[in-house]
Amino acid sequence: MVAAALGLTSKKLAPFLSVGSIFVSFVLSLLSAFMSKMPYIVRIPWFSFLGDNVSMGMLFDGLSIVMGTTVALVSFLISVYSYKYMENDWGWTRYWFFFTFFVGSMMMLIYASNLVVMLVGWEGTTLASYALIGHWYTDEPERWVGDSNRKAWNVDMSTSPSHAGIRAMVFTSLADVGFITGIGMLYYASGTISILGILNAMPHILGVLYSRGLLLPFLIAFTLGAFGKSAQFPFHEWLVTAMTGPTSISALIHAATMVNAGVYFLLRFTPIIITAAYVAGMYAPISSFFTYILLIGALTAFMMASMAVSSNELKLILAYSTSSQLGYMFMAIGAAYFAVPTVAIFASMSHLISQAIFKAALFMAAGVLIHEYSSRYIKNMGNAWKNMKYTGIAFLFAALSLSGIPPFSGFWDKDLILDVTLYSGNLIAYALGIAGAFLTAFYIFRAFKLVFINKNENAKEVEEAHPIELYPYLLLGVLSLVFGIFWYFPYGGLSQIIYRLMTYNSIVTWPSFMTASGVTINASLSAISVIVALAGIGLALYLYAKNRELNIRSPFMLGIQKFLYDRWYINAIYYRIFVNGTARISSWMYGHIEWGAFDKFYHALVPRAVTGLGSRLKNYQRGNIGKFISTMIIGGAILLIILIVAIGVISVV
Amino acid sequence: MNYIAIYALLTPFIVGAILLVLNKKIKPTIGAYAVAASLVLVTAVDSILLYAYGSYMSIIVNLGKLGSFSLIIDGLNWPIIAGIGLVTAVISVYSYPYMKVRMKEMGKEHEWGIYYFLYAFFSVAMLGIVESNNFILFYIFLEVALIASFLLIAFYGYGNRSRISVIYLIWTHLGGFLFLTGAFIYGLTLGTFNFYPVPVNISLLGPLTSIVVVLVILGLLIKMAVFGVHMWLPYAHAEAPTPVSALLSPAMIGIGGYAIIRILYVMFPSYLVSGQWILLALSLITIIYGGMMALKETDFKRLLAYSSIAQMGYMLMGIATLSPLGILGALMQFFSHAVGKSMLFSSSGVLITENDNLRDIRKMGGLAKSMPYTSTFAMVGFMDISGLPPTFGFFSKLFILIAVGSELVKLGTAGIIVLVFVLIGFGITPAYSFVAMKRIFFGAGSIKGREGSMYMLVPMAIIAFVGIITFMFPGAIMGPINEFFKGAYLGLMM
């Protein structure tokens, strides 16, 4: 199941090993859905610490199987695609090594039965994403992301691959520290790290932490890793610049591995927290925690969609889109506490599946377009429909699914998410969600219109993609339609199967009032979201009917455009405050404290004082060494004085 | 059987002495292999003894009032022995191609005997420190190691090496002096200088206890180079010949942390509790300060030296939790740091010997393409110190953070402040690591590097392999520590 990282063998063999192992893990994931007894746990002893055994354990339940199957399927198709896409790349074996490592880590994370194994997979994806985002580490200009000379508040808005890799690493691993510390708090309160153990001990854990006044800080710290990984505000910046990696890797990060890990983590633990809060009768801190998730999700969904509206790089549009869609998933999770939890959790999961399918299709199509036009800017593309009909179809289907147009799969779950958000009673989140949906439809059809329909004299002539590249994303594009059709019909369709799998084969035993027998759609609310989406599409087609660029004149609108294009100045703020701030502090400390104070004091002032003393007493010291030996004596005397004071203080205390 | 550990420990001394006598008559590679083999022998014997006995103690000689000179091998020092044994043996081979270049540069081409004599004494004295069960024996070995490393820096170092070696000597002796003063108060009051078994009459110390604890801990903190008394470390570790840096940096300074555990945590747990806040704050400051300096530093070896300071902060943080979990993390931190930092210093050594003393990071960039192996090993090293799988560093970071998380709960709401600083401190390590990685190996780059020879790459590969294999089978390092905590100490600790 855990696809082993075998890639470093031979040049020819590497891709086959990789593709093959991913395919095997897909088949096994799918088969395990038919297991009779669930949840099912496999334990392979690994190590023990202080009497606690940690196993290389795997946990099969509805959630992990649904997730594992989705991830393995999408990763498999992307691996097939990249066999052609990465042809003749100078980092060929390295690519396959980390690709397999990436998928393997993700599978490990998904099927982990305890937090240590999950963390290994978790950090493994961090490492693999670092390596793959920085795959073209020689930083040729065409691999960068962002306009090369653009500056916002004097901060460069373009990022090189190796720089983008560092950003991914630093943003996510900063958040991970919170996650690991959270594990420590869990361990203190429960004495266990296995997920089942935590499930049983959760009411107790909540009680212990609440009595110490640490419940909310704990929940935030524990889920911080998920926010980092899933690129939610304020950690979203790394995902944007992660576009410097090969496009197949962008597809992998955005659709299958990495970003979904954070959502999966919350899907795994929020049910446990919700049921435990019910058992422990603890509502206030839990409710503020879920409101926080809901609002962060809604904010990210809206903010990233708005950035996508103004972007000129095809991959960048899709990157903003991913972060925005992840925001929707977070919204559903946040709403879970206030609406029917199982339905909201299901909504989040099913949106994850749809997103994986259409986003992988969009990215792979974008990769081909970027190759064909030899440019990452949509201003250099146009009229692609003429020669690339199949790519166009795949892109269109995926775009419709992303916009939430029935009967595409994206419709059902985005609608469900907006439903549960409304039920949660948080109107701000609902309004942001609706506005985000409008912008989503707008930006993706703006891209579609400009790339596929509108004529462009600057653009090159293009050809249809090679079949190895084409079939994977065409299949995914079609899947987003097929899934959509069978999602709800007949008899509740796929949604019912997945809902039952997730609810009844879950490790969590839901109290009956928290579940619904199935998923239903509120027709009038769906009408609103469809109208909003259609309005977005309509506006995009209307505004870009003829022209390639909007002719914006009013300074106000230009200001907004700049604001959006420069990513709400968040990047600039981060660099101005954190990066430059840290750099300034560290160079100040380096100059003044390290060299100015410590070095001067220890290695100049003290020796000089001693020299002065020594020469007055006797012409004793000879050269450097004598100086330092006298330093030693004086230094020792000073330290002794400090010591005596310290001892005095301590004994008084 | 009783003397086998001491015989094993004597072999490298003897090998070193023979090499000194033969000096010019032997081939340097033979010297390298002989020293490496003798060090492997010590480690192997120790591991067999540990495996056979669980915990092993052998009394060499009884000294009446001084207690007994005895060696101890148990779970507490197993990660340290393993780390030092691995690094010293492997770097012994690595130092052959390195010192060849260095000696040629200095016109000292025929000093192989002296070099390997000092190297062997330095290495095995470190093992001796770790195994000794007596303050005096501890100090004697410490003195041997200090003088040997002092001479290595003074003979083969860079920059103003006489000044720097004296700085090193004075600072470490200051630490040793404080330590010894504490040891004398302890020993003369109690009538024994032994660590284990903990003297039954330890309460006799009475009010002197706090003096002993403060003296010993100050001495050891200077050895560890925590914030405030760290100034000697960047000098010594950066200007020492690189193989010696690779020994000094992870192994030598970490012994200070180990000794805090062995001596203070085991014998005076209640006294540490009153100073727990200070230790925790000190470790956080050390981590953040070291990381900040590493971000700023442009000399590769000095950067690594600052990173060592930060890593010692990690170790101190594990100790400061005063829980078995934190001690476990701290001991594992020693091993993972030994693996990671020795690999990083080795890769800086490749840059120095093969690329004309290249140390300035500002002149580097894009070297990964011309130096694929070195950059891979450096990457593994940086992964290790940032705690990323699949390297052993993952576990040490994990357990330290779990212990800190537990400690936060005990602190209550005040824990939130600590949590913020922990986030900054542990976030800064991957930042400086991967920023350095980019500045050295990635990016456009203007120069073309030359890859090191097999004598350099194979030792690095061995260390990298161990770092990864111990990730897969962490029981090899953790098992004995578990056994230790299962034993008699556990009741005492909590």
Image: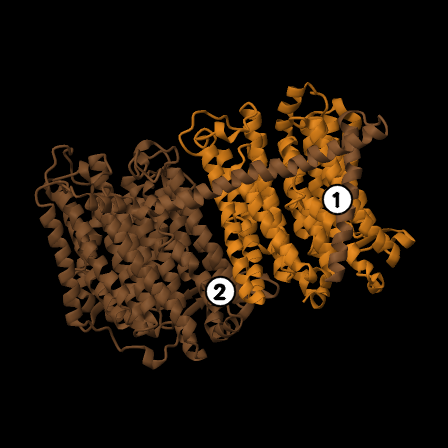
Chain colours: A brown, B orange
Chain letter behind tag 1: B
Q: Nearer the viewer, mark 2 or mark 1?
A: 1
Amino acid of disc 2 = Arg
Q: State left or right for residue A55 relative to residue B2.
A: left
Residue shown at 55% from the left, 33% from the top: B300
> Horizontal and vertical percent for residue A506?
37, 72
Q: State left or right for residue B352 relative to residue A453.
A: right
Chain letter behind tag 2: A
Would you name the residue on which mark 1 appears? B175
The answer, for residue B193, to whether it is visible in the render is: no
Which residue is nearer to you in this view: A414 or B74? A414
Q: Up-down: is A578 above or below A60?
A: above
> Horizontal and vertical percent for residue B51?
69, 55
Quadrant of the rendering where the C terminus of chain A is positioned: bottom right
The kind of secondary structure element at disc 2 is: loop
> Which quadrant would residue A463 be assigned to in this image?
top left
Would you name the residue on which mark 2 appears? A43
Pointer 2: residues within 10 angstroms few (<14), some, or many (20+)? Answer: few
The answer, for residue A116, to whether it is visible in the render is: yes
Q: State left or right for residue A480 relative to residue B18.
A: left
